[in-house]
Each structure stands twice: as structure tokens, then as C-alpha cells.
Amino acid sequence: MKKPSNVPKKFLFISRWGEILDIAYATQNEGNEVKLYIEDKPSREIGTGFVKKVRDWKNHVEWADILIFDYTGFGKECTDLRAAGKIVFGGSEYTDLLELDRNFGQKELQKHKIKTLPFKEFVSFQDAIAYVEKHPDAYVIKPSGETQELKQLLFVGSDDEGLDVIRVLKAYDKSWGDDFGNFQLQKKVKGVEISVAAFFNGKEFLKPINITFEHKKLFPKELGVSTGEMGSSMFWVNQSPIFDATLQKFEPSLAKQKFIGHIDINCIVNGNGIYPLEFTSRFGYPQIFIQRAGINEPIGELLYKVATGQNFKIATKKGFQVGAFMVVPPFPYDDKKTFELFSKDAVVVFRKDLKEGIHPMHLKKVNEEWLITGNTGIALLVTGTGITMRDAQKMMNNRISNVIVNNGYYRTDIGDRWFEDSDRLWSWGLL
């Protein structure tokens, strides 16, 4: 049964890796009761001391007023729970497939009459190498299914003959062999990489929509390995030609599937058009935390209103929001020994006791101290907001300078992309 907005509620967060801690903690600080379940065993210490943790989320379904799933792969559970009358924020089998099965996602884009980039699916590295040798060009290697969680395996080629892609495919063949699963080679296109995202209440998209620019490489100026994410810049808008050309066309399909949650589509855009690359049919990380910095209403209440199918305009800040991850070794690699040696249980120190814009990631709280836990080395996300991008960056950098994370590193140029990208987007009529 739906509860009025000013009444505290019971939130059960079901998490794959513990990424949702910041939202769970904020929801609790807003006066609600919160329980957090983490599926991944090495990540289960995340959130201890911040929120109440549970061993088996299914034992707490009856307790909860709302269940929030933070990842793809829970679609069937979400559908079954909704059918049983529970209030659920999360995916569906259809939206799971959009993200996890790249082939299906591309076919759905074509079905909705959305222009896509040419791609080919492979299960064998040898076949892919032969294909590039026969059709020399610049390609992107994109793992599908579970392997796509290992973001450093995504490879964006820069050689017009595809020689760098062939070299990487040979290396993957040696290290992975047949265990890699299927993957795509997608033709590479030059342009601006941009995401459009929105909340969907089971019937329609809620405005405003979110425009995000991700910074995926480890080092400033897009150097180094792909990490999945080092930070993002964003803003909220009521209208977007990119949204109209992509996500908006999925509104009837998402309504038919009774999807209730958050969905994002990543695109490359240039003077010739808008080319969707992939879906994220769940919260994006760190996108959701930076969004929270720009939302002027309690995040728990917002998620509850979306999950109960309410139609409302989200209260957001004008201007820009930015966020940077502060990470420690071995990020972005998986190396247990290095993590335990350099990072595990290291204390996050605050020069002044100011935690505004500091979002806990893979942390636990012991005697009011924030300690690094988990196994990947993402300590914090630090956000800033402002009327201009420079203002937002300045606020974020001031907050970063208040935090000491031993052996910590982060990118110092989050948001810089905007200054050139915005000129190009204006000239193409896409802002």
C-alpha cells in the first residue's frame, strides 16, 4: 500500500556489488529505515556501520515498503515481486536483455527505427582477427554478458587499418582462450560521446532528463587504460534532440514491459547523426551519485514516487554537476594481494569535518572512522555543483582538497571535456 510522502518508509536495497551504499545511506539520513543486502561475497563488508546489513534479502521482503535493485540481472525477481503486489524500483527481463545482450540491444534499436553503427558478433578471437584482416578499419572491441563487467577489456582502436585491434585480439586469445564468451566488433566513429538518461515510472519518462559526459580513462586527457569510469559531468534539461532520437522512442515498449527504474543510453554524435552505442538499464555509477548532488528533493522520496508510478517533475538544480572518483591501488585491476597490502582498512581522513558532497563508495564505518574495504579500491566519489562548469569543478576540487586518502589518485580534469564538446554539440544543433 502506498504511503504519503512525509511518512518515513522501510527501504530494502538489493545490491550486486555494494555500489548503492551512498544512496542507501542518504535515504537513511532522510529519516527512513534502511536495510542493505550485497550479493558479491568479497564486497559484503561494504556499508557496515553505515546502514543495517542483511544476509538474505528474501527474508525481509515482507518488512519492506519498497525494494530497490541496483543492478541488471534481477529482472525476473522484480517482475515476480510486482506481480505479488510489492513496490519495486528495478528492471525487467526485457531491460536486462537490453544491457547484457549487446546483440539484442542493437536489434531493438533497429526495431525502433534508430540508426545504429555496423557491428559483428564473434565467439572466436581467430574469426575476429580474420575479419579485421579482411575488412581493415578502426573498430571497438566490446565484451558481452558477464565479461563486460571487466571494463578494462573494452578496447577502442585508433588505427585505421585495425592493426591495434588485431594485436589486442591476439593478446585476449592467449590470456582468455574460449572463456571470454561472445563479443562485438563495432565500427568506430569519431564524435562526442554523450549519454542521455531518465527515470521511468512504469508508464512514461519523467522530466527533466539527464545529459552525462563520462571520463573513462584512468589518467587526465584520456590517457591510460579504460576503467569504466573515473568521473562524469552532467546537467538536467527538459528537452533534448538526442533524447527525442533515442530513448523517447522506447517509451511505449518500456511501458508495455512495466519497467520502473532508471535507464541510460550512451551515444556517439557528430555532424552526420546520433549513433547509440549501448544501454544501461539501471543506475549508472557514479552517475546516480552526481545526479543526487543535482536533485533538490530527498532521494529516497524520489525513488519511492517513481516506484509507485507517480507523474511529477523532478526538482533539480540549474547549471552543472561534476563528480570524480578517488581510488586506491590496485584500481582498475583485480589484484587481491596489492589491495590487502596498500589499501585494505586504510582510513579516509577529513582535514575539516565537512562531508557535504562526499559520497562513500567501498567503505565501512568503525568507531566513526571511514575505512576502505571491498576489493576494487574505489574509496569515494566527490561532487560539486555550480551555475557554470567552472563553478562546479571549483567546488569539487575544494572538497577533494579536504580529503586525505593514502595512496589515493583521481583525475584532475573531470568536466574539461565540456568546453570543446559543447561548441561541437551547439554547431550540430544537438544541445
Image (spheres, grey):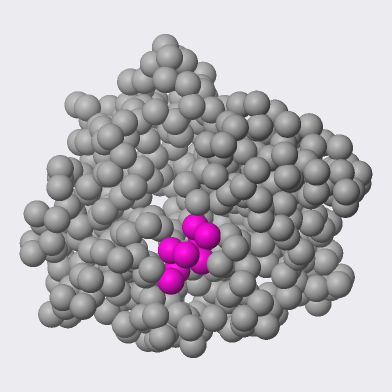
At 47% from the left and 21% from the top, the residue drawn is 335
Q: Is residue 212 left or right of residue 12?
A: right
Give the quarter of the figure containing the N terminus: bottom left
Q: Position of residue 7 (x, y in %)?
A: 15, 72
Using residue 196 as the reference point, say whether residue 161 is left or right of it: right
Q: Position of residue 252 (x, y in %)?
A: 49, 87
The answer to whether residue 416 of the structure is visible from this angle is no
Residue 25: x percent and y percent? 28, 49
Q: Position of residue 367 (x, y in %)?
A: 19, 26
48 horizontally vs 228: left or right: left
**Magenta span contains residue 229:** no
295 vs 312: above or below = above
- 388 lies above or below 285: below
The residue under the point 74% across, 45% down is 128
* Magenta segment: 94-101
Q: Assign the magenta stretch its main secondary structure.
A: helix
Dividing the picture into quarters, in which one does residue 109 lie? bottom right
Left or right placement of residue 390 versus residue 41 in this view: right
Please say whether residue 95 is one of the residues in the magenta stretch: yes
Q: Quadrant of residue 244?
A: bottom right
- Compare residues 427 and 281 and report the one nearer the observer: 281
What residue occupies the far top of the structure in this picture?
341
